[in-house]
Each structure stands twice: as C-alpha cells, then as structure tokens.
Image (cartoon, rainbow, N blue to C red):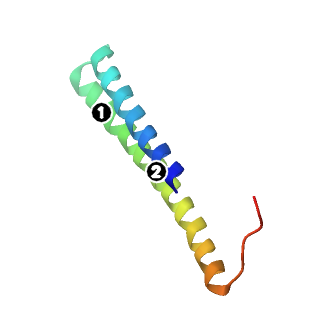
Amino acid sequence: MRRAILFLGGVICGALVGAAAGVLLAPQSGAETQEYLRKRLDEIKAEAMEAYEARRKELMEEFERAKKGVRPAAE
C-alpha cells in the first residue's frame, strides 16, 4: 500500500512539474495553453481513477478472501 501511495505521489509531482515546464516553454497563446492543460488534466484524472478502481477491486477481492479465511498464494 505504501508503495502505491509513493508511486501516486510521484506521478502527481511529475505531472505538476511537467505542466509548469509546459506553461513556461509553450509556444502557444495563453488560451491555447489553458485548453491544452485542461485536456491534459482530464487525462491525468481519468488515469488516476482507473488506477484507483483497479486497486480498489484488488483490495476488495483480498478482503473477501480474508473474510472467508482463504489465504492468497505466495507471490
């Protein structure tokens, strides 16, 4: 779980740094840059939600197995 949180934190930090660099170095107008950033933020949100849902599903399955007393195979 800690690794997932650290990874997500890294993704968010990387996205923020990339966005800041893009704004500072962008050859487009302000309106075009804002539209690009809006679209990119929507993409990042969608990716984060997909990762969240996948991890949530894994945890729910593990929780259900734990309630039944079934242990997962060693990884």
Q: Position of residue 40 (x, y in %)?
A: 39, 36
Establish if 34 lies above or below 28.
below
Residue at the location (46% across, 50% down)? Answer: 5
Helix, strand or loop at label 1? It is helix
Q: Position of residue 71 (x, y in %)?
A: 72, 75
Helix, strand or loop at label 2? It is helix
Establish if 53 lies above or below 64.
above
Instruction: Specify the amino acid type for callout 1.
Output: Glu
Quadrant housing residue 59: bottom right
Q: Residues within 10 Å of mark 1 (few under 14, many from 20)?
A: few
Q: Position of residue 56 (x, y in %)?
A: 52, 65
Residue at the location (29% across, 26% down)? Answer: 33
Q: Between 64 and 54, which is closer to the camera in this rendering?
A: 64
Q: Which mark is residue 35?
A: 1
Q: List the single residue furthest toward the bottom.
A: 68
Instruction: Specify the amino acid type for callout 2.
Output: Ile
